[in-house]
Amino acid sequence: MPTTRIGVDLGGTKIEAIALVGGEIVARERVATPAGDYVETVAAIASLVDRLAIDAGADDSTTVGVGTPGSVDRATGLHRNSNSTCLNGRPFESDLDSAIRFPVRTANDANCFALSEATDGAAAGRRVVFGVILGTGVGGGVVIDGAVHEGGNGLGGEWGHIGLPHREARDVAPRPCYCGRSDCLEQYLSGPAIEAEHAAASGKSSSLIEIANSAATDETAGAVIDRFHDRLAESLVTIVDLLDPQAIVLGGGVSNLDSIYEVVPGLVHARAFGGHAATPILRNFHGDSSGVRGAAWLWPDA
């Protein structure tokens, strides 16, 4: 009988869990995240896993993967860099392992996204895959030969917190980031960052979709979207030149803009070292389910 893999995606407002058997979802449930309450968050995940295990007919071979904001500092075992701040400085992975009767692994949610798309999504079959999250925040994940590459410090793929490359005069005013540094990619490529830039230029508040839809006819909106395309391309060139992945997969709400796939690949390929790159830049296959599916796949050898 195929192994049951339970995946959990911990978000700021909801916790989603699935039971995956042979690559197919056989059970799914969502609950509200106990905002700001660490003990209740651990308890909610454990309870969710118990219910899904029953629904899926789990046995002793069942495994659990949890995708989280932030990640574990492998030197201390403590969670860090999470915008769900109640997790930071706590032994979250260890506490989950104690609360759940099955073996548990955790990984950053962007790593889970990348793993999902590399396993059976848009980049299935590619050895080296870089996954990008463009949403309320910006992140990245690296998958090599079907496994997440965390690196020696557990920071592999933290692309959203590198500095914007090739800053120009229009970018001269620093954009502080919650991480304590300035001008991180998240402050230029996230949905809220694009909306804020448009509001500053136009004097009116518009959603990302409204900005994108008016880009062809409104000069201000068009300039904002053009700058976004240019910044995204420059930022992906750094990945191509450094890692040279066999595919880059985009996820998150911003990745739904069709113009990205029409404009950005050509810019990346022309600007990569030598000007002859052909790295596929792909729309995700599993959509909002990528993160929770990737969490389940954190146990590929089960």
Image: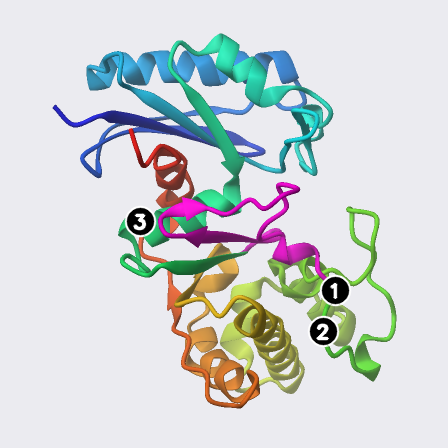
User: Where residue 44 sits: x, y (%)?
Assistant: 49, 15
Q: How is the image coloured?
A: rainbow
Q: Is residue 21 magenta?
A: no
The numbered disc on residue 165 is 2
- Residue 205 in the image: state x and y as whole percent: 68, 63
58 left or right, relative to 192: left
Q: Label 3 belongs to which residue?
A: 119
Q: Amino acid at mark 1?
A: Gly
At label 1, counting other C-alpha atoms closer than 10 Å, the crowd grade (few under 14, some 14-19, many 20 or more) is some
Mark 1–mark 2 contact, CB under 8 Å?
A: yes
- Residue positioned 59% across, 46% down in the render: 151
Label 1 sits on residue: 163
Q: Looking at the picture, tell me which residue is in the foreground, 242 or 26.
A: 242
Secondary structure under badge 3?
helix
Residue drawn 36% across and 47% down? 116
What's the residue at 83%, 48% (across, down)? 180
Q: Residues within 10 Å of mark 3 (few under 14, many from 20)?
A: many
Q: Is residue 34 visible?
A: no
Magenta stretch in the rendered image? 134-163
Mark 2 crowdedness (10 Å alpha carbons): few <14, some 14-19, many ≥20: some
Q: Residue 137: say if magenta.
A: yes
Q: Position of residue 39 (x, y in %)?
A: 62, 12
Check disc 1 and report its element: helix, strand or loop: loop
Mark 2–mark 3 CB contact (< 8 Å): no
